[in-house]
Amino acid sequence: MRSCVIIPTLNEEKNILKLYKKILKTKINLDILFVDDNSTDNTRLIIKKLSKNNKKVKFIFRNHKKGIGSAHKDAIKYAYKKKYSLIITMDADGTHDPKYFKSMIKKAYMYDYVITSRFKKKNLIKDWPIERKLITYTRHILVKTFLGLSHDASGAYRCFLTKKIPLDIFFQSKNNDYAFFWEITYQIKLQHYTIYEIP
């Protein structure tokens, strides 16, 4: 089975190597696909060096900042085209720990779509800056109120088998930024696919 972890980047030179090493520590056989939106720091240089030393590191370099939702769409389309069986998506800033890969992959065989939740247990985001906490909680309440989604629909840390979710669902989202995540979660729920949340 071919697996791929998708990581959008924008000026993440301080985080890429740390995340890369954590992914390698999982000892899970997967490719790493970076999608960079024209970073102005050394992000691209670091990715190129990793790719040169490890053939499992792939990249898509885009010429403009097109949004994190757009980055996911391009990467997911690439992964389907390359016939990966399993896809994990995550942020590059260190908030998503690869130690959850194994449990996410296990659940992906039991459910259609696996997402991670910051609200299933207490104090999961206690170390976050107050501004980010406020944005996260406010977004969660609004999505729950207007879309009826009880899930933590705004996070990017997700996992699924490509044979279970058709590619076109990801392009039903009109938004190319953060709204992409709750739009897709809503569409998947609306079309009666099963969703599982890991704290």
Image (cartoon, rainbow, N blue to C red):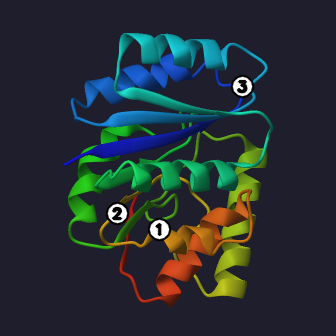
Q: Is residue 124 visible?
A: no
Q: Nearest the camera: 125 or 16?
A: 16
Q: Which residue is mark 3?
A: 11
Locate residue 97: give its quadrant. Answer: top left
Residue closest to the eye, 107 or 33? 33
In this view, 77 is above or below 51: below
Amino acid beneath label 3: Asn
Residues at discs 2 and 1 in contact (Cβ within 8 Å) = yes
What amino acid does circle 2 point to? Answer: Thr
| First in sequence: mark 2 vs mark 1 | 2
**Helix, strand, or loop for circle 1?**
helix
Q: Which residue is mark 1?
A: 167
Q: Is residue 133 above or below residue 186?
A: above
| Res 162 label | 2
The x and y percentages for residue 192 are 42, 89
111, above or below 122, in the image? below
Which callout, 2 or 3, points to the residue nearer the camera? Answer: 2
Which kind of residue does numbered mark 1 sit on?
Leu
Q: Quadrant of the C terminus?
A: bottom left
**Residues packed near mark 2 inside 10 Å, few (<14), some (14 to 19) or many (20 plus):** some
Task: Measure the C-alpha gap from mark 2 to mark 3.
Answer: 29 Å
Considering only order in the chain, which callout, 3 or 2, is on the residue closer to the N terminus? 3
Q: CA distance from mark 3 to mark 1?
A: 28 Å
